Amino acid sequence: MSVKQTQNPKVTTVPCPNCKTDVQWLASSEFRPFCSKRCQLIDLGEWADENHKIEGKPGFTDISLTTDIEDIEAMLHQQPDDFFK
């Protein structure tokens, strides 16, 4: 990602991740780093469709589906009394 300085040296612009339009990096830039709500929603759809993803650690697996409610309750009972406070 390239970052450019605009004519105002305190304002930085970045390319929209979707359409590459320059976006001013300001608190008032409602959709930053995207240029518009449309580009923001397109990107969200890409993540939802799993076209974008962040790989986990090698060897990482999801929690086993064989863990049943009794095992979870037993683990919770081993926590200190103020665990959920």
Image (tube, rainbow, N blue to C red):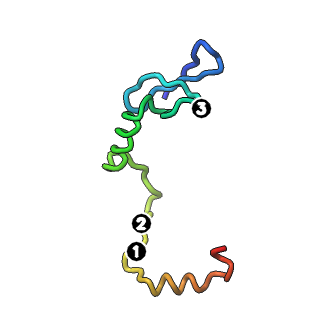
Q: Mark 3 vs mark 2: which is more N-terminal?
A: 3
Distance from the alpha carbon under mark 1 to that under mark 3: 42 Å
Residue 78 in picture, x, y percent from top left: 61, 85
Depth check, front residue: 41 or 56: 41
Residue 74 in picture, x, y percent from top left: 53, 87
Residue beneath label 1, please? 64
Residue 48 in picture, x, y percent from top left: 34, 50
The kind of residue on which mark 3 rests is: Ala
Q: Residue shown at 51%/33% (left/top)? A: 30
**Numbered circle sitting on residue 61:** 2
Q: Are marks 2 and 1 in contact (CB under 8 Å)?
A: yes
The kind of residue on which mark 2 rests is: Thr
Distance from the alpha carbon under mark 2 to that under mark 1: 8 Å
Q: Residue shown at 46%/87% (left/top)? A: 70
Q: Which element is circle 2 on?
A: loop
Residue beneath label 3, please? 27
